[in-house]
Amino acid sequence: MGCSGVTGRVPPCPHRGKTGDNAIRNDKNEEKTNPKHLIPAQHPGRLRGGTGLSAEIGEYLSHTEALAKKPATPSEDGEDDDIDLSGSNCEEEKEAVPEAKSSTLLDIKPWDSEMDVAQPEPCAHSAQLDELVRGSSQLVPMGCGIQKLQVQCVVKDDKGGTDLLEEDITEFEVHVQSVDIAAFNKI
Amino acid sequence: MGKEKTHINIVVTGHIDSGKSTTTGHLIYKCGGINTRTIEKLEKEAAEMGKGSFKYAWVLDKLKAERECGITIDISLWKFKTSKYYVTITDAPGHRDFIKNMITGTSQADCAVLIVAAGVGEFEAGISKNGQTQEHALLAYTLGVKQLIVGLNKMDSTEPPYSQKRYEEIIKEGWKVTHKDGNASRTTLLEALNCILPPTRPPDKPLRLPLQDVYKIGGIGTVPVGRVETGVLKPGIVVAFAPVNVTTEVKSVEMHHEALSEALPGDNVGFNVKNVSVKDVRRGNVAGDSKNDQPMEAAGFTAQVIILSHPGQISAGYAPVLDCHTAHIACKYAELKEKIDRRSGKKLEDGPKFLKSGDTAIIDMVPGKPMCVESFSDYPPPSRFAVHDMRQTVAVGVIKAVDKKAAGAGKVTKSAQKAQKAK
């Protein structure tokens, strides 16, 4: 259900490539240890230095759009998802109609102060999980001229994980250094 | 925000029908967690629609709907005030990634609030063996949340309503509470919150600061950012980064645009280091004072691990990814030493062949890549971890002991050498 499988990733590491641990990184067990260095093979365009960011994002968007079409109806009512719930634990049975959702606030951080901080925005836009609601966003100064982007997201509890979301966003590693969860609440 | 009130973090858990979300909503609503303009607007709307006595429920529903759309950011950071504290409250979601976030996230809870419903049958169902209530409380306790408030909710649904007898009954029901400190028996939730002991983030311990990010800033240089977990960070001290083994001098410390003369535990700071490139240090590294128990790479460590949900059996050789402070590294379960009873901590079995969901065990682990971790007794915050596999949190753990690797000759920057000579 994710946008990209973990397998088949190649470490391009444009920022911190020369650390000499590429050999370790290729080790299968280590694949997930540092997702920001990994890019799904489905986006070969990202490996070509000359490709502009907008093109990359466009490519990524079309990829996620294709994925978004797979679930039958991403309706907000959650009625289509009753089947999913039947198998889940007893706590949720009683609440089968309004599906459990959580609100998360993501901190998306750039690499340096000179970076165009507006840039991570389209990345967050495009990182679409199944039935994810992307709320508003704001830029928050962190000191030393660095600004982080805060994005509000609403996720369904038994749909994609937040780590998947983090991974998707950190794939835009040209602009994104890391993603942290600033708040995580039940709705 | 001035410094007049201490900031505490609480997490609310409870059975699905305990009314924990309503209680959380009420606290925020009544204690100034939502801006007055929003409240006034909603209350006016409620009055116009003739909601009268159902006003609260209606306003809470409205706010819930608003959160669902994710429109306003400030209502997702739930804060309110009591007469004593600034409180950030988290209504624990059922989301499987929440536990991981509770362990590695920005705000470790100082206290858990467990809401139980008092209604006949409801309470019993909530705390029954397969009820998750006790599970949550135990999990929070194992991970270092040592304070718990039990909130008795829905007292109006007892027979008769607000029955003192029922209250006594529930109090007796196996809640063997030992008050170590901060006695807050039989009081209102709000008063109980005031009785929480504020977090003791010890400034007298040696410095530990796990890095969240490392920035390159024009005109300034390299600025690592992270939260001081223990100890004090000051300009002029020589810090060592583990496990990369880089030593340098701290030029300046900044928090919220202001230069600080010292940063204390709990402060989220950026600090400028000289002669260190952004390639030398990274997220997951830990900074410490080079002269006072400097952080070191762990060759291996022993941890108490609770298997939460794993479809199969876990045996030695299993190598999932651990999230410990800001590090994210695969570690191998080298030896399953003993299976223990999660409540009493008593040994159940020596050298178990395998573990399954619900088991607790003492395990020797070996990191797949250089990693810096600490034991719970020395430095609690960087000793907790979540185990990640198959896109979910499969286990949680606490590190009991660390086998530190003897540090070789690392990179010592010129400014660090100068600073060391000067002293």
Image: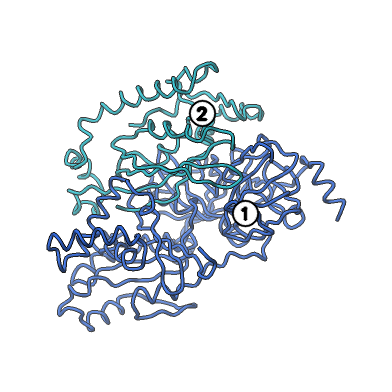
In x, y percent, where is residue A155? 32, 43
The one of A139 and A38 positioned closer to us in this rendering: A139
Q: Colour of chain A?
A: cyan
In x, y percent, where is residue B72? 34, 49
Q: Colour of chain B?
A: blue
Mark 1 belongs to which subunit? B
Q: Are marks 1 and 2 in contact (CB under 8 Å)?
A: no
Q: Quadrant of residue B50?
A: bottom left
The residue type indicated by label 1 comes to Glu
Nearest to viewer (mark 1 / mark 2): 1
Residue that numbered label 2 is attached to: A38
Q: CA distance from mark 1 to mark 2?
A: 35 Å
Residue that numbered label 1 is attached to: B258
Residue B140 in the image: above or below residue A171: below
The one of B68 and A131 positioned closer to us in this rendering: B68
Task: Work out whether residue B319 can be spotted.
Answer: no
The residue type indicated by label 2 comes to Leu
Left or right: B150 in relation to B330: left
